[in-house]
Image: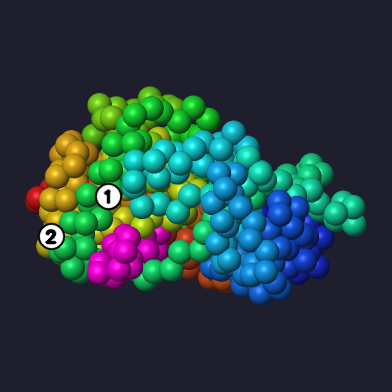
């Protein structure tokens, strides 16, 4: 990795804003908005943000702005400083509110004291913290009801059809108006810009850099030959752009038994919501060999098209979108390397062997992008 990246735990502790987010700081933040924790706090799995399950005191019954009681078990999300502006986060929250109003099963932030987005200033003794060379000012955070569930069984046709229907309902709401502040999914933002960042920060070992750049360029050439992103900064031509979940993989869908009230899928984590083509919210639910992926896609679209038309031309975007995610993921890991949770959980990242593997995966994607479309 580049010499700009902190090399050890003492430097991480001194530099990263999350070093100030102690359990006491989390509970103090909730107390500031009238939610008193009883001391039980559990960190949940999240790399991009910090997310905690918190049990509230049962003796006190705080209410939301509309008078609805606050659940006794809540989840607080502290957004990564510097990633989103308040206006971008508020668009995420407003989108969630629109989905709830349309009876789409998502988990929205609670409206407390007239707001869904809250702020916690840093303590004076945290002044040593820095964020991209500037003084760290504090955290933006939201609170939502804790919802249980398990991952969906994607080998079940009925489950896939059900998810397809709900994705179509998300997209019906998403197509009603655009985001104005949140960025779009594009070849520029997920392919060109990540590559430029990796090279600027010398994140790829010299012995692999040329091979990775050649594979990246070949992948870009294949997309340009297909008429995608041929102009710098362009979005997907010829396809409708709408507000998406944006990161609709199985881990962001929780399933409850169908025989329970409100059973079925509910969608969590709209943190990556952005403008893009509808197929972005479908392709990450596909896995296995070509025949298996085709069968899964057939059932997703069976449900989807009961609610909303799907432009079958978008099937040509599945492999390009997978290629974009591959490049974006590597740059995401590199950008986050100053956060101590990343070296701990991704110790294999950044080695020459890692990047050789990425070259091989890009070469495989170049072939996949030139294969016939999945049959549905």
Question: Is 153 situated left or right of 7 in this image?
Answer: left
- In the picture, the disc for residue 166 is 1
Q: Nearer the viewer, mark 1 or mark 2?
A: 1
Q: Is residue 263 magenta?
A: yes
Secondary element at tag 2? helix
User: Local crowd at mark 1 within 10 Å, few (<14), some, or many (≥20)?
Assistant: many
Q: Quadrant of residue 226?
A: top left
At 81% across and 68% down in the image, what residue appears?
10
Question: Is 262 situated left or right of 78 in this image?
Answer: left
- In the picture, the disc for residue 130 is none
Q: Which residues are magenta?
A: 250-265
- In the picture, the disc for residue 295 is 2
From this view, report whether residue 261 is shown above or below residue 180: below
Quadrant where the image shows the N terminus = bottom right
**Chain-order first, disc 1 or disc 2:** 1
Q: Quadrant of residue 82?
A: top right
Toward the bottom, the furthest residue is: 40
């Amino acid at each position: 990795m580049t010499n700009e990246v902190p090399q050890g735990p003492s430097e991480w502790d001194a530099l990263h804003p999350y070093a100030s987010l102690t359990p006491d700081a989390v509970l103090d933040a909730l107390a500031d908005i009238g939610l008193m924790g009883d001391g039980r706090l559990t960190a949940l799995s999240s790399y991009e943000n910090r997310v905690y399950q918190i049990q509230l005191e049962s003796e006190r019954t705080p209410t939301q702005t509309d008078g609805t009681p606050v659940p006794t078990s809540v989840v607080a999300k502290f957004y990564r400083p510097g990633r989103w502006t308040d206006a971008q986060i508020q668009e995420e929250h407003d989108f969630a509110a629109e989905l709830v109003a349309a009876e789409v099963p998502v988990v929205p932030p609670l409206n407390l004291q007239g707001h869904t987005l809250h702020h916690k200033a840093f303590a004076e003794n945290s002044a040593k913290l820095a964020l991209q060379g500037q003084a760290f000012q504090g955290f933006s955070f939201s609170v939502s009801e804790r919802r249980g569930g398990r991952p969906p069984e994607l080998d079940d046709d009925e489950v896939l059809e059900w998810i397809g229907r709900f994705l179509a309902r998300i997209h019906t709401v998403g197509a009603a108006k655009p985001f104005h502040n949140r960025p779009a999914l594009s070849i520029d933002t997920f392919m060109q810009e990540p590559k430029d960042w990796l090279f600027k920060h010398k994140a790829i070992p010299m012995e692999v850099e040329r091979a990775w750049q050649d594979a990246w360029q070949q992948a870009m050439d294949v997309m340009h030959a297909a008429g995608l992103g041929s102009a710098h900064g362009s979005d997907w031509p010829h396809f409708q752009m709408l507000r998406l979940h944006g990161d609709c993989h199985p881990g962001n869908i929780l399933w409850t038994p169908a025989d329970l009230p409100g059973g079925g899928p509910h969608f969590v984590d709209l943190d990556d919501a952005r403008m893009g083509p509808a197929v972005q919210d479908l392709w990450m639910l596909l896995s296995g060999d070509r025949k298996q992926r085709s069968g899964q896609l057939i059932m997703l679209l069976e449900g989807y098209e009961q609610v909303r038309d799907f432009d079958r031309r978008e099937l040509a975007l599945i492999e390009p979108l997978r290629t974009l995610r591959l490049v974006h993921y590597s740059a995401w890991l590199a950008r986050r390397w100053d956060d101590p949770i990343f070296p701990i959980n991704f110790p294999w990242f950044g080695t020459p062997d890692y990047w050789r593997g990425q070259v091989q995966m890009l070469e495989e994607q170049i072939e996949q992008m030139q294969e016939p479309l999945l049959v549905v």
